[in-house]
Image (cartoon, rainbow, N blue to C red):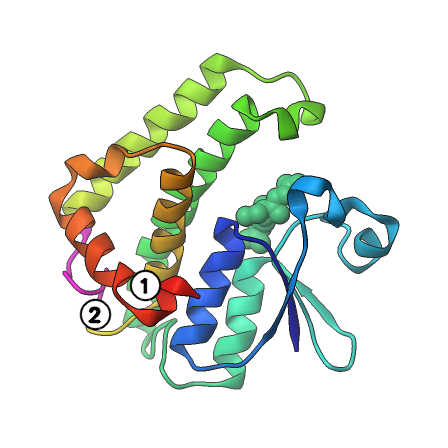
């Protein structure tokens, strides 16, 4: 199987997940900034015009990082990264949604409102970009209070929540947002998880 890829957070999240599960994927680089996702050929494969998306050997396309992750978990159960029991599933989902909706998406809103790349999406607003960063900070504060582990966000193994949060922080750093330095538990987790081989995937 192939994954259409770019050094961007949702793609990185899947790369880390696949590495942790030892699943081999052929990564096809797509130059998002040069609009390579918006060519007719690419839009035919993925009308969303985003990465990541997965192409199976029979040509089936799976779009959306979470859907790809569910597929990968389904084809290889070890190590379990989405939860074994109903309670584990719920607790992993709880932190993963906070990372994705509360942090990664807010950073996305921020970038949509300041980057020339997204200028064609509609009027950009400095107030909207500021509001997104404020929400990001508020949610970091909540995260700092609920993070339970040092090596992993939750439980004693890597889960999808580690993949989502690590790629979010990598993205934050790449755009000069270093707010997380004030949060000692999160920073200690970030440093520790950054030492794993998967963090370079
Ligand atoms: N919900 C989607 C979001 C995908 C997404 O926004 N990908 C970004 C990179 S992280 C992208 O391709 N952006 C290009 C664009 O919006 O034109 C997912 O989880 O896969």
Q: Judge whether residue 153 is colored magenta.
A: yes
Pointer 1 or 2: first along the chain: 1
Q: How many marks?
A: 2
Residue 154, picture quadrant: bottom left
Q: Judge whether residue 177 is colored magenta.
A: no
**The disc label shown at residue 155, or none:** 2
Residue 131, picture quadrant: top left
Answer with left or right where residue 32 lies relative to residue 42: left
Mark 1 crowd level (few <14, some 14–19, many ≥20, 10 Å Cα): many
Q: Are marks 1 and 2 in contact (CB under 8 Å)?
A: yes
Query: Which quarter of the rendering shows the N terminus?
Result: bottom right
Judged by its main secondary structure, the magenta piece is loop
- Identify the residue position indicated by label 1 in the image: 92
Q: CA distance from mark 1 to mark 2?
A: 9 Å
Q: Position of residue 181 (x, y in %)?
A: 20, 38
Mark 2 crowd level (few <14, some 14–19, many ≥20, 10 Å Cα): some
Note whether 165 is above or below 77 in the view shown. Answer: above
Report the span colored magenta: 146-155
């Amino acid at each position: 199987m192939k994954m259409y890829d770019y050094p961007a957070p949702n793609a990185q999240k899947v790369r880390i997940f696949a590495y942790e599960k030892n699943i081999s994927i052929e990564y096809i680089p797509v130059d998002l900034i040069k609009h390579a996702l918006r060519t007719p050929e690419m839009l035919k494969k993925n009308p969303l015009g985003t990465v990541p998306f997965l192409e199976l050997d029979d040509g089936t396309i799976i779009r959306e990082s979470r859907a790809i992750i569910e597929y990968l978990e389904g084809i290889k159960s070890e190590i379990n990264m989405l939860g074994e029991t109903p309670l584990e599933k719920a607790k992993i989902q709880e932190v993963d949604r906070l990372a994705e909706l509360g942090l990664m998406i807010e950073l996305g809103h921020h970038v949509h409102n300041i980057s020339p790349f997204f200028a064609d999406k509609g009027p950009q607003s400095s107030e909207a970009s500021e509001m997104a960063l404020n929400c990001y900070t508020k949610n970091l504060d909540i995260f700092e209070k609920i993070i339970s582990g040092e090596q992993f966000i939750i439980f004693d193994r890597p889960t999808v929540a580690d993949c989502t949060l690590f790629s979010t922080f990598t993205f934050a750093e790449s755009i000069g947002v270093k707010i997380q330095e004030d949060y000692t538990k999160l920073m200690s987790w970030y440093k520790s998880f950054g030492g794993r081989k998967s963090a370079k995937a």
